Image (tube, rainbow, N blue to C red):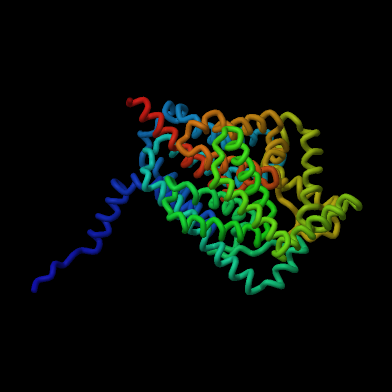
Amino acid sequence: MDYKITNPLKNWLQFLKFILFRGKEYLPFIGFLLIAVGLTTSPALVSIGVGAIGLYIFFNPFSFTFRAFVNHKLALSLSTFFIVHLIAIAFTVYANFIWHELKNKFPFLIIPLAWGVTPTFSVQQKKWIYLSFITTIMLVSLATLINYTLHFEQINRGILQSKSIPIISLSKSISHIYFSFMSAFAIGLCWVKELAPIHYYYRVGISLFLILCLHLFATRTGLFSFYVGIIGVFFYLLLSRQLSRKFMLAIGGVVILAFLGIFTFSSVQNRIKNTIEDWQIWSSQKHFRYYSLGNRFFIWQVGVELVSKNLWLGVGPASIPYLLEKYHEQYSAGVPTEAHLKDFHNQWLEYCVGLGVPLALVLLVCFLLPLFYWRKLEQPLIYLYFLLIVFSASLVESILERQMGISFFICFQLLLSNSIVEKSAVIKNK
């Protein structure tokens, strides 16, 4: 029997040729998929995903036209975030952190640029991205829940000292804060059957499990953004007279779980005790130790002071870590260095301090731009829920100062708004 002998080098060259000439068409999809998986598992996957999207621009330099990019208003508004930070270099007081600052903001440039020239994702591709995101959230939540059960007493004692429940994932650098509001978004996403085709009973099980974990892990940012999103959607449906019996039952279930959490979950009870104690110490003594909430009060006061002194141009975003460390050295005697905050834990205060109030208002308008057309989308409720979650989280965290938060915001902002492009095209063809 004759066997055909193949040349391994030739096979690899053919594979490389396929990747370069045909596989490059799938780079945006691969990039978004890696980002969706990496958001809750590994920052390295997010970086690779952003790099894959950047490669698409590199392989298709002639398909990009400035006119097409400008016509895509959402992509243009998102890239404005990077452009404004680039302008801010001119009035940065301390230049040591400039490269670090711009590197973190690269997704604001690369992903919108690619989106302006990327063919619309197929429905199946978008479903893969959404399902991958929900699946990884589920797996990480399960691993974290098992770890919490195994170290129950130790973790609950840590909560009383503002310690977080460790998130068990591929990377130890996954923030419990970011994971919490992404979990809140996944709860709503799994109920949109057009985006995440999951059986009804699985949908109920996934949402109940994630809501349970959200309360058990007791991260204030995630709980705050979750309830703001739910209440916002509830009032929209109430005012537009679209409130259904199923949604009312769902709201009732969430309220019951919340009360169960307060009276039965020791993690929630300890978090409430920690919050009350922290507030009492701060309000009576103006001393915050190293506790989370008091540390925020201090840093917000510093931010307001810096805004009043640099109202129009700010201090430059790259100067903020240096200035905050100076304030900590002056006012935080006895507080461990690792407890010093590197940002203001409020995205809009961060922009006011770093960029000045006028440019901060420009970015706020860019952020709120989708509100002018969100009701025209095929899935307006999940889009409203997403915007409410991101905006509420940005009030208590500087979520757009790290690649994980930036990539989450941009990717789902573009994916959820993508349906308006398809819908408009259908209307135009008719």
Q: Is residue 69 visible?
A: yes
Q: Horizontal and vertical percent for residue 163? A: 72, 62
- Going 29% across and 46% down the picture, which residue do you hit? 21
Q: Nearer the viewer, residue 80 or 126?
A: 126
Q: Is residue 92 visible?
A: no
Q: Quadrant of the N terminus?
A: bottom left
Q: Quadrant of the C terminus?
A: top left
Q: Nearer the viewer, residue 2 or 92?
A: 2
Q: Horizontal and vertical percent for residue 294? A: 80, 52
| Most distant residue in the left direction | 1
Quarter-of-image position of residue 166: bottom right
| Most distant residue in the right direction | 284
- Going 57% across and 50% down the picture, which residue do you hit? 250
Q: Nearer the viewer, residue 258 or 5?
A: 258
- Going 24% across and 64% down the picture, which residue do you hit? 8
Q: Horizontal and vertical percent for residue 260? A: 68, 60
Q: Horizontal and vertical percent for residue 86? A: 59, 36
Q: Is residue 237 left or right of residue 28?
A: right
| Most distant residue in the front direction | 245
- Going 73% across and 29% down the picture, which residue do you hit? 312
Is residue 57 depicted above or below 209 in this figure? above
Q: Is residue 133 left or right of residue 277?
A: left
Q: Is residue 5 left or right of residue 135?
A: left
